[in-house]
Image (cartoon, helix red, strand yellow):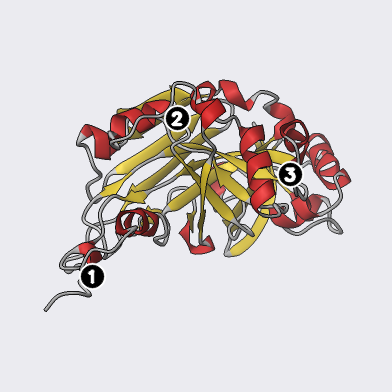
Amino acid sequence: MKLATYVRGGHESFGVVTDDGIVDAPTAWPNGPGSVLKALQAPPEALARLAELAPAAGERIPLADVQLLAPIPQPPKVLGLAVNYAEHHAECNRGSELPGDPHARTTPRPFLMPGTAVAAPNAEIPWPGFSRDVDHEIELAVVIGSRAKDVSPEEALACIAGYTIANDISARTVTHAEGRAERPKDAFFDWLHGKWADGFCPLGPWIVTADEIPDPQGLDLELTVDGETRQRSNTGHMIFPVWEVVAFLSRLMTLVPGDVIATGTPSGVGWATGKLLAGGETLTCRIERIGELTNTIGQPPEDFYAPCAG
């Protein structure tokens, strides 16, 4: 089942996406949950009931008649994962090598992103005023469906409601470093600041429920910029599979329904290839069995943020 959030005629709603269009859930189930998030927060029977709506419903709304939003426009939490593909670590030449068996001798490196980073499919991503160098990162995103605290990897899969696509847009440099006195950990915080800008985490086009993707570690990924392939890989190359990521995070914090976890990017990012983004370019992310997420990057500002100027 595919669950989408959308706007039609100025009204926000959600529904089940079929080959013939969208079945509006509140119309077909008037007393049911009013959003994708509320459906995930409801007892598990709610998703089963939504899956039954499509075959029985009469009216279907053509996809062309709606404006898709992020499946969960304001997730309770958005988390990212740094360096979950060994190939990405290697291309960035960080100056330190992963151990021979990173799965056995390292741990995931998560970070939090604000809800304001979430962007809709087809939305223009604003170019932030604090960076001259903006990059792309296609990622499989996990959507949590039930509360997870201190779960094992074996238990983690049952906590996943489904999957969507994330583009973890990244500011590779920050202008507030210019003229700044260096302090320990500056490089780390500059990198972290580069993940927080408005619209820097497009999500979509919908959530595909976990029953339709029993093995999330065998999905092909591809990102193109103006039609040119920049990233191509398979989720089977992750260092930590999704169930281990969920289990690890559940030891650090309680995961709740609607939380979104971007699980890391493969090689091919612009920082490594010398092909950073330019204003106006179109980015399309494709993940097998999920679909396609397209966005454009806005134009750089004329004046950049310079807190240390003068």
Quadrant (top left, top right, bottom left, bottom right) of the C terminus: bottom left
Q: Which mark is residue 59?
A: 3
Q: Label 2, secondary structure: give it.
A: loop
Residue designated by label 2: 85
Q: Quadrant of residue 82?
A: top left
Residue at 76%, 41% (x, y): give it: 151
Q: Quadrant of residue 135?
A: top left
Q: Select label 1 or label 2 by which is in front.
A: 2
Q: Position of residue 241 (x, y in %)?
A: 59, 29
Residue designated by label 1: 305
Residue at 53%, 32% (x, y): give it: 291
Q: Position of residue 288 (x, y in %)?
A: 54, 25
Q: Position of residue 7 (x, y in %)?
A: 58, 57
Task: Inspect the image, locate mark 1, and give the three-letter code of the amino acid beneath it.
Answer: Tyr
Task: Inspect the image, locate mark 3, and give the three-letter code of the amino acid beneath it.
Answer: Glu
The reply, left or right, for residue 131 in relation to residue 75 is left
Crowding near the residue tagged with mark 1, few <14, some 14–19, many ≥20 C-alpha atoms within 10 Å:
some
